Image (spheres, helix red, strand yellow):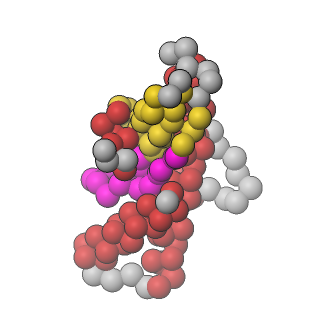
Amino acid sequence: MKKILAIILSVILLFTLSACNNTFSKAEESEIAQLLYDASEMSKEYITPIFEEKLVSQGIEDYTLIETAYGFITSETPQTIVAFMYSYHDITEMYGYKLNVKFDIISSMTPKEELKYSDIFSIEDESIEIAQIVFPK
């Protein structure tokens, strides 16, 4: 489900970008798709510990993560979304984050270069409503 969401959102972006910039070569399309997928994966890795800390601060330490969904959002500013569905004490909840992404940093990274995720991502918004975008009731 997670990879499907990332792929679908990437394809939508590719069509949007193609319409704005006439055409891309197959190599450019592949590079863009890979960049979007990498950004989605990194945003999930960045926000997961923040989400876990949030639960602990609310006294929710014994929980089960049911599903995590993440992907790129087509918008004027590059963004990703990461949403969590979890349960605790027979209660199922969801919570999501919208993150701004500095794609220029990601695209210029070398394979062995390590950056702090906080250099690449910033939290734009967080709420149950964001999670409901990918986990509709």
**From this viewpoint, is residue 49 visible?**
yes
Location of residue 35 with respect to 60 vertically, above or below = below
* Direction right: furthest residue: 112
**Residue 120 percent location from the top left of the image:** 52, 43
Residue 90 appears left or right of 117: left
Residue at position x 64%, y 43% from top?
115
Residue at position x 46%, y 28% from top?
91
**Residue 51 percent location from the top left of the image:** 53, 30
Q: Quadrant of the C terminus?
A: top left
Q: Nearer the viewer, residue 114 or 2?
A: 2
How many dots with numbers? 0
Quarter-wise, where is residue 50 in the image?
top right
Residue at position x 44%, y 61% from top?
5
Q: Nearer the viewer, residue 28 or 52?
A: 52
Residue 72 appears left or right of 41: left
Q: Which residues are magenta?
A: 67-81
- 68 inside magenta stretch: yes
**Residue 114 percent location from the top left of the image:** 69, 47
**From this viewpoint, is residue 21 visible?**
no
Location of residue 74 with respect to 67 vertically, above or below = below
Location of residue 6 with respect to 130 vertically, above or below = below
Secondary structure mainly formed by the magenta segment: strand
Q: Nearer the viewer, residue 74 or 63?
A: 63
Residue at position x 50%, y 15% from top?
58
**Residue 56 percent location from the top left of the image:** 58, 19
- 59 inside magenta stretch: no
Q: Nearer the viewer, residue 129 or 27?
A: 129
